[in-house]
Amino acid sequence: MAPASLPKRLDSLTSLRFFAAFAVFTFHFTGTGQQTGFGRVPTIFPYSMIGGQGVTFFFVLSGFLMMWVFKPREHPGVFYWRRIGRIWPAHLVALPLAIYSYYVMAHLTIDWPSLILSVFLVQTWFPHVYPTLPGNEVTWTLSVELLFYLLFPLLGRLAQRCRTRWMAVATVAGLAGMWLTNWIAAAHATPAMASWIMRLPLVYLPEFLLGMTVALAVRRGWRLPLRPVVPVLLLAAYVGFYYQGRPRFSPGAARQIDYTERQAIAILSVLIILAFVQREVRGLRGVLNTRPLVLLGAWSYCFYLIHHSLSRIATYSWGRLPDNDWAVFALLAVGAVANVLAWLMFRWVEEPAERWMRRHTPKRWLPPAPEPGAASLPAPRSEADPLPEPANR
C-alpha cells in the first residue's frame, strides 16, 4: 500500500499505551519484594515485576510512531517545538506532587542541582545525581526519550535513505550492543556506576531504532502474517519462563538471561505493535479500537506521571498493606484515582498546552503559504512522502 492509503489514526496503539502504563503502575504498587511497594498481591507477584519493562514498550512505540508520521520536509524546529508542548507542561504540573511524595513525606533532603536537572529532563545524563532518580522518579524515561527527540530529525532522514535490510542490520547490532554493555558494566563497574550506565539514554537508542525500522518496513509494504494473540501469548510465556525457569539455570546463565531481558521485551513489544497495526491497515477493528480504551490511552501519559507519587503518598499515609490478595482492591482503587486525575491533567493541561504550542509555532519554521490566486496543483506523491499525523500523536 502507498503511504497515502495507510490509516491516519492508529487507535489500537493508543489503547496499548494504557496497558503499558498500567503495567508500570502495577510494578511500582506491588514492589520488588521485601517491604517495597504499597502492597504485594501474591497471585500476581513476582510476575508483576515485569511491568517495569512497560517503559521498553514505550521506547519502541515512540520510535514506531515518529517514523510512521515522519515528515522529511518539516523543519526540525517544528518537531522540537511540538515535542516540548507535548511533554513538558504536564511534567511541570506533576512535579510538585512528586516532590511532596518523594522528598517531603520521605523526609529526604533536596539536592537542588539534581532536582533542577530533572526539571529539564537530563537527570540520567549525569552519574552523581541524588537520589538515583531525582525529582519525579518516573521521568527518568523522559530523560531517555529526550536524546531520541534531539536525534530523530536526523535519524528519520537517514532512515528514509537507507534500505530496510540495512536498518534491520543496524537494529540487531544495536540490541546486541545493549546486551554487551550490560554484561561489561555488571562485570567491571561498581553497582552504582553499572546502574547509571544502564540508565544512559544512549544505551536505549536501539529500542527506538527497532520501532523506527518496523514502521519504515510496514510503510514500504512489508508484512508479517501475525495475529495479535500470538505475540501476546509469547509475552506471557516469556514472563512465566523468566520468573519460573530462570532460577533453575546456573548463576552465569541466569545473569545472561537478565542481560537480555530488555531486548526480549523490545522484540515482543514490536511484534505486538506490528500485529495490531497490520489489522488497522487492513481496515479491521477490535476491542482496542473502542472509545473507552482509546481515551484511557490518551490519558496514559498523565497517568504515568502521577501514578507512583500516589502510591508513595498512600504508603506514607496509611502504611504498607498486608501481603495478601485483598491488596488487589487497593491497587484498583489507586489506579482509578490516578486515572481520574490523569483525565483532569489531560483535559486542562496536556491538551490545551499542546494546542497552544501548535497555534504559536514560529512562522519562520512553517512552509510559506501559497500566494492569493495562485494555482494549487497537487504535487506528485512519492513513496517517501509523509503521512498525516494521527490523532494519537
Image (cartoon, rainbow, N blue to C red):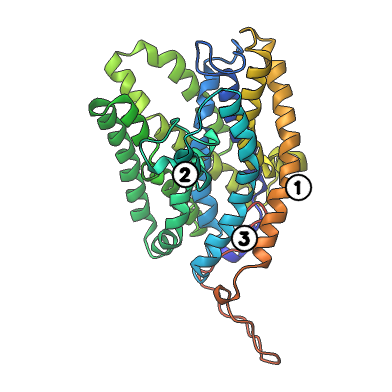
Which residue is outermost to the left?
A: 188
Neighbor class of circle 1 (other Cα within 10 Å; few <14, some 14-19, many 20+) is few
Element type at mark 3: loop
362 up-or-down from 289: above or below: below
**In this orientation, does residue 16 appear?**
no
Query: In the image, which is nearer the foreground, mark 3 or mark 2?
Result: 2
Q: Residue drawn 60% across and 66% down?
A: 4
Q: Considering only vertical position in the picture, is 95 above or below 360?
A: above
Disc 3: CA contacts within 10 A as few (<14), some (14-19) or many (>=20): some
Residue bearing mark 1: 347
Rendered location of residue 166, percent (x, y): 33, 55
Q: Secondary structure at mark 2?
A: helix
Secondary structure of the residue carrying tag 1 is helix
Q: Earlier in the sequence, mark 3 or mark 2?
A: 2
Determine the residue positioned at 71% across, 18% down.
Answer: 330
- 213 with respect to 103 (left or right): left
Label pair 1/3, CB-CB below 8 angstroms? no
Using the rendered view, name the quadrant where residue 298 is placed: top right
Gap in Å between the C-alphas at discs 3 and 2? 31 Å
Q: Mark 1 to mark 3: distance in Å?
A: 20 Å
Dot label at residue 117:
2
The relative height of residue 40 versus residue 180 in the rendered view (above or below) is above
Residue 339 appearing in the image: yes
Q: Amino acid at mark 1?
A: Arg
How far across and how far down the image is residue 261, in percent?
40, 29
Q: Quadrant of the N terminus?
A: bottom right
Q: Tell me the tag on residue 389.
A: 3
Give the foreground label among 2 and 1: 2
